[in-house]
Image: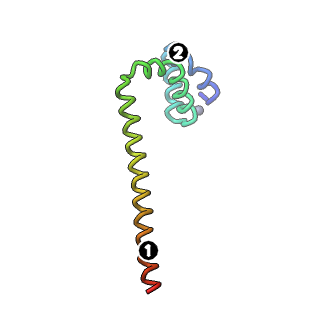
């Protein structure tokens, strides 16, 4: 099975409308082809996956976002600490230089 055929069969595969042999060939191709796997993931998200996302507990999604925000803030804090540290070093160097 080639990429073109695989991509043509994706919707049928997701709707469980492929016969066993075709499905087996389809899966074999997708497992060995990153492009088709990506395509299938997108198709899956567009068709069935979105319903699953809607069913996902809101709290989990919020927690996930929260975690990302915390990490982002930590990175920012580290950066300003680093800047402050560099400033102190620069001042010390300047003092030594002028003394
Ligand atoms: Zn392919």
Identity of the residue drawn at 36% across and 22% down: 57
In the rendered image, which quarter is residue 84 located in? bottom left
Residue ID at (41%, 41%): 69
Report x, y in % for residue 14. 51, 18
Residue 5: which quarter of the image? top right
Gap in Å between the C-alphas at discs 1 and 2?
A: 71 Å
Q: Position of residue 70 (x, y in %)?
A: 38, 43
**Marker disc for residue 91:** 1
Residue 74 position in % (x across, y down) = 38, 49
Residue, disc 2: 18
Q: Which of the marked residues, 1 or 2, is nearer the chain's N terminus?
A: 2
Residue visible at 39% across and 22% down in the picture: 56
Mark 2: few/some/many CA within 10 Å (<14, 14-19, 20+): some
| Residue 95 falls in image quadrant | bottom left
Tell me the quarter of the image containing the N terminus.
Answer: top right
Left/right placement of residue 59 relative to residue 9 reads left
Disc ID at residue 69: none
Q: Which residue is found at the position 51% from the left and 14% from the top? A: 15
**Image coordinates for residue 36, horizontal then vertical, percent:** 57, 31
Q: Residue lying farthest top?
A: 17
Residue sitting at the far right: 4
Relative vertical location of residue 97 with respect to residue 24 in this rendering, above or below: below
Q: Relative to residue 61, is residue 72 depicted above or below?
A: below
Query: Ligand 1 is located in which of the four quadrants?
Result: top right
Query: Is 85 or 62 nearer to us in this picture?
Result: 85
């Amino acid at each position: 099975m080639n990429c073109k055929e695989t991509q043509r069969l994706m919707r049928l595969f997701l709707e469980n409308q492929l016969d066993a042999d075709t499905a087996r060939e389809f899966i074999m191709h997708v497992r060995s082809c990153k492009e088709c796997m990506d395509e299938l993931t997108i198709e899956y998200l567009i068709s069935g996956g979105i319903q699953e996302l809607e069913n996902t507990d809101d709290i989990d999604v919020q927690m996930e976002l929260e975690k990302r925000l915390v990490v982002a803030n930590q990175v920012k804090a580290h950066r300003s600490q680093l800047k402050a540290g560099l400033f102190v070093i620069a001042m010390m160097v300047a003092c030594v230089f002028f003394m």
